[in-house]
Structure formats: structure tokens, C-alpha cells
Amino acid sequence: MHTLHKTLARAAGVSEVEVGDIIEVTPDFVYFHDTGGPKVMQKFKEMGFDRIVYPDRVACVFDHEVPPNKVSAANQHKELQAFCIDQGVRYYYAKGICHQLIPELGLAGPGMLVMANDSHTTMLGAVGAFATGIGYTEAAATLGTGKNWCKVPPIVRLEIRGRLTDGVMAKDVMLHILQEKGMRWGLYKALEFAGPTVRDLDMDGRMALTNMSIEIAGKAGFIEPDAKTEDFFGSEVYERFASTGAGEPVYDEVAEFNVEGLAPQVACPHTVDNVRPASELEDVPIHQAFIGSCTGGRFEDLEIAARIFKNNRAHPRVKTIVIPNSLNQYRMMVDSGLLDVFLDAGCTVTHSTCGPCTHHHLGLLAGGETCIASSPRNHKGRMGDKDSLVYISSAATVAASAVTGHITDPRPYLKDAVRVPRPAKRAMVSMESA
Amino acid sequence: MAEPWCGRAWVFGSDIDTDQIIQTGFLQMFLPDEELGKHAMTIVDPAFAEQVRPGDFMIVGDNFGCGSSREEAVVALKACGISGVLGSSFARIFYRNAIHQGLRAWEVPGIHEEIQAGDRLCVWPSEGRVSVEDGSYEGAFTPLPAFLEDIISVGGLIPYHQQRLQAKRSG
Ligand code: SF4
């Protein structure tokens, strides 16, 4: 059995599963956030549940509208926070975006079945989990019973080869896959990203791939754990997960991709598979540039953007917003001196939140405005007015575009730039909830 | 052999997203479920909400219910009184929401190319069988396992757990 099928079998308490089986499972970890959470809580109460069965396997992450920007949000947060305290569930307030924070805290890892009330839960496949998004009603029932169900998906191996040149990132690879396969290709399937290109990627880039698995309709994304996964958790935490063990490399389908010589890619309005090379879009002026989100707000994204901003200011007419996607990433930005670069370049740097990625909180677009963003989605109205436009790209392309004021291929800006090394890990202090 | 469920077919295409099933505008009005039903599918076919009868079936193409994961899309269709949706494939989260809200969604690959609007269909839910009454079409699907059938037959997760917990308390 493949690692993912082994994970499902274990969570179902059976020795084997087959593609298409509908199985009852006990997820190892469940989480929700501040916009879905209030509905989860409401349904939980409506169903008549009293206590969450496994409170130690649950987390609530306040990340979408934090700190609150309207009274209604403040009131909802207050209620949700009280619910968490009463139920003995850990919660994190403005400490990072849920999909980044949960693995960073070592709460989910290899071999675990994770179900969370958000579609980008697929991201946790980068650290070896079977992770998938669920609705708020079923999330409520899962809290009350400890159980949910799952249809065993076929597993597709995406074999990716070819060297990425400087300025071409995992995000570009994903946009390339979307262009080739379209937004429906991964329906019901679990997508394993594999091959030399994927092995070479750091955890940051790997997370960008599994994160966007949902954009191609995948039920889950996955990368077989290796030394980089162990490094991400640190050996002590990694050991805790190790017992579950890897499965076999058996696949229901294999798809090959060659990304040798791939140029920076951009998804144009209003779908993520409407992809063209950045160099063909140089006549598109932009009003806002956004580096952040669970897809494109990690150290790797911040570092490459800072290399571009080092000797180039953001264009004075472009609202340039930089958001590290967790407190940990924020610290790395500060420790490595990137914050200074962003401030000198005229960027607005905010605390860790979803921010402009979805039209909930800050950085909304006006009608007729255009944004280029390192976030995952660009459907109509995603970032503000229904008549605004969103182009999706890597953080490098966003930064180069912020400098020129129109969509720009970042490669020329990186020619002589010196790479900033990743700073040493710092302990995740002040994280536990009250 | 259990009695089949029979009704008329309404046929739709592929990639119908949840915004086409129920427009965002209606959600912000906080309408009761029955009212939501009156606005179901109006972008795609205004006649549907007016003329659909309890017991009718919807036939859909691939990826039905893609886009935003709003659970109201399911609520609106259920409120129309349809017996179920037979589709070539469903967006995953729509399929899950359907079960959890008590709407039957059966996956029958290619069905939308075989059925004509207005055909009379018969469906045997527990046997996983569907046919056009005049015998011009026969299709098959995997019946739901018992633990999901239990949820769907009482109208979804909320009534299911309400009844279960009530029984536990009084029992
Ligand atoms: S950053 Fe964007 S895609 Fe990620 S969880 Fe937040 S809103 Fe969703």
C-alpha cells in the first residue's frame, strides 16, 4: 500500500483499504479558523453535543481577520475563544496562518490523518500527512464524535524533472502544471509530488506545491518525507511521527512534467489555469503587489523578494504589502535583516494574517484595480471589488512587478543579487494558548 | 427487490459551480430554506425552480458543485424536493456537503450524455441501479455504506446527531 493508503487504513482501524472504499476514520488532528470556526461551533451546539471528544487533537487558529477589523468579528472571536477555553482546546491568536502554524508547532506530521475546515489543508501533505479540507457541519460532527469518513482516493505520482533557474520557484511549477492539466484534473485524487525537482526543493517550496493541490481539485497533496522533513521538525519531534512508517511506491497513475528552462509564470484573471509567461504580460499595469498567504509567505518567498528590493524601491504608485505567514517566518525575516530591506523599499509589512488573500480583512482592491499576488486564488472578487483583477505568480515576480509598476519577469533583477542565508531556528516561545 | 424511486429528469451540463446553483446575493438575505429553493439554478435554467416537482431528479455532468464550498448550494437543491442528483462527477466538497445535509448524490460516469430532459427515471438506491422507464438506458452506481445511509435518511448530520443524542439522554 502507498503511504497515504496506509495512513487511511490505520485511521480506519483496518489492515487494508482499496481505492473507492468508503471508510469511517478517526482523524489524528482537526483544526478550524476564525471565519469557519463560529459556524463549526454553532453546528456543534445545534447537534446537541456537549464536549469535544478529543480536545487535545484539536486546534483553533485565529488567522483570517486578526486583530478584528469590525465589531462583528470581534464579537465572534470572543465567543469562539470562550468556546475553546471551555472545551480545553488550544487556540492561537494572530500567530500565523493555520496551515503554516500547525506543522511548525509539530502538531501534525508524517503518517497523520488531518482534517480541517479549510480547502488549503492539503498543504500539510508536504510534511507527509494525509490532509484534506472538510465542511463546517462535518467538522462539528467530527469534534463531537471523533469520527468522520473518507473515500479512498487513487494516487497519482507527478514525476517532475528539470532544474529551476534562479527566479523560477515551486509556484511557477504549480502554475505550469495547472496550465497543462486544467483545474479539474485532480478531482477525487491524491497527488504525490515526486522526482528530482521536488527532492531539490526546500520545505518552503514543497509546501507551495501541496498547498495548491486543491487548485487542481486534488483531495490531498503529498511528498514522501525525507531528510528535509526531519530537518523541518527537528529530530526529536520527527521521531514521534516515525513509528507510522512509509508505504510502497505504488500508483494508480503517473504523470510526467519537465520543467527544465521553465520561465516565470502568471495566472491571469479569473482562473488559476489561465496561465501565461510573465514576459508576455509586461503591458499589464498593477496597483497593488502582495507577498504573503499560506501559499507564498514563507522565508524563501521573503528572501527572493528582498533580493529584488535590495537595490530597487517599490514603485511609488504600487501599494506593496509584505506578510510573513507565521510568527516563525516573521522572526526569520527580522533576524536575517530582510525587514530593513522591505522598509527601505517602501513596502508595508504587517503581522501574520491571511490579509489581502481573501476579501475579509485588509488590503482590499477597488473596482478597476489590479493586483499581482503570491497567494493561491484569483477568481472574480477574491481580493475586493468584483471589478478588480488578480494575477497570481511567485513572490519573485510579484516583487519585480512592484518595482516596475507592471507585470515583470524577475530574472534580470536577480543576476548579481546575493542570497541571504536562512537564519538559525529559534524556539517557538509564547505560543501556547492561555 | 425494494421499490424504485421514479421521477422526471432535469438535465444540466458540466462545471456548474455553487454560485450558479445559488447566487451569493440570496445568501446575504438569510432566507429560509424553502425560499432558497425558489432561486436554485436560476442562472442556468430559470424554468427549473418554477417547474421542478418533488421526486424529480437532476442529471449533471462533470465537477458539479465546484467553486466556493457554501453548504447553502445543497440546501437550496434539497428544498426543491428533488429525490437526488445523478452526476458524471461531483466536486468533492459538494459531494460531502450533500451527504451531510441529507441530499442524495449518486456518481454515474457519463450519465448526462445518455439522459434526455423530461425522461422518466427510476432509481434503486440500495441496489445502485438507475434506468429510464422505457428501458433505453441502464446505469449503475455504488450504494452508500450503511453508516452514511443512516445519516442521509434522517436528513443529514444535524438531525442525525440530534436524534441520537436525545435517544441517549432519554434512554
Ligand atoms: S492565506 Fe488565503 S488561501 Fe491561505 S488560508 Fe488564508 S485566506 Fe485561505
Image (cartoon, coloured by chain):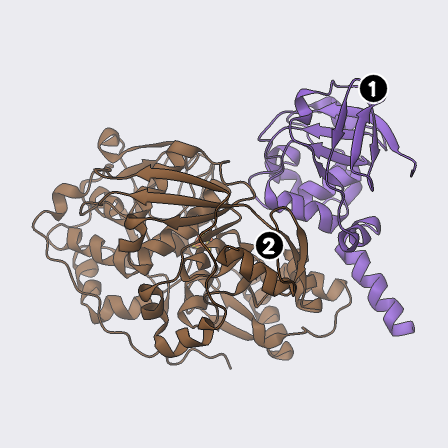
Query: Quadrant of the image for the N terminus of chain B?
Result: top right
Q: Are marks 1 and 2 on the same chain?
A: no
Does residue A117 appear to the left or right of A428 in the view shown? Answer: right
Chain B tint in image: purple
Type of amino acid under label 2: Ile
For the residue carrying disc 2, how many other residues have a C-alpha within 10 Å: few (<14), some (14-19), or many (20+)? Answer: many
Quadrant location, ligand no. 1: bottom left
Does residue A305 appear to the left or right of A412 in the view shown? Answer: right
Q: Measuring from the top left, give residue A14's x and y in whole percent.
A: 65, 63
At x 39%, y 62%, the residue is A225
Q: Measuring from the top left, give residue A72's x and y in whole percent.
A: 57, 60
**B110 vs B22: above or below:** above
Q: Which residue is mark 1?
A: B135
At x 26%, y 68%, the residue is A332
Query: Quadrant of the image for the C terminus of chain B?
Result: bottom right
Label 2, ligand 1: CB separation under 8 Å: no
Type of amino acid under label 1: Gly
- Per the rendering, the mark at residue A134 is 2
Does residue A384 appear to the left or right of B44 in the view shown? Answer: left
Indicate the secondary structure of the residue bearing disc 2: loop
**B93 vs B170: above or below:** above
Please identify the quarter of the rendering in which residue B62 is found: top right
Question: In brown, which chain?
Answer: A
Please identify the quarter of the rendering in which residue B86 is found: top right
| Residue found at the very far left of the displayed protein | A416
Q: Nearer the viewer, residue A284 or A366?
A: A284
Q: Measuring from the top left, give residue A38's x and y in whole percent.
A: 62, 62
Q: Chain of mark 1?
A: B
Q: Chain of mark 2?
A: A
Q: Measuring from the top left, give residue A318's x and y in whole percent.
A: 26, 45
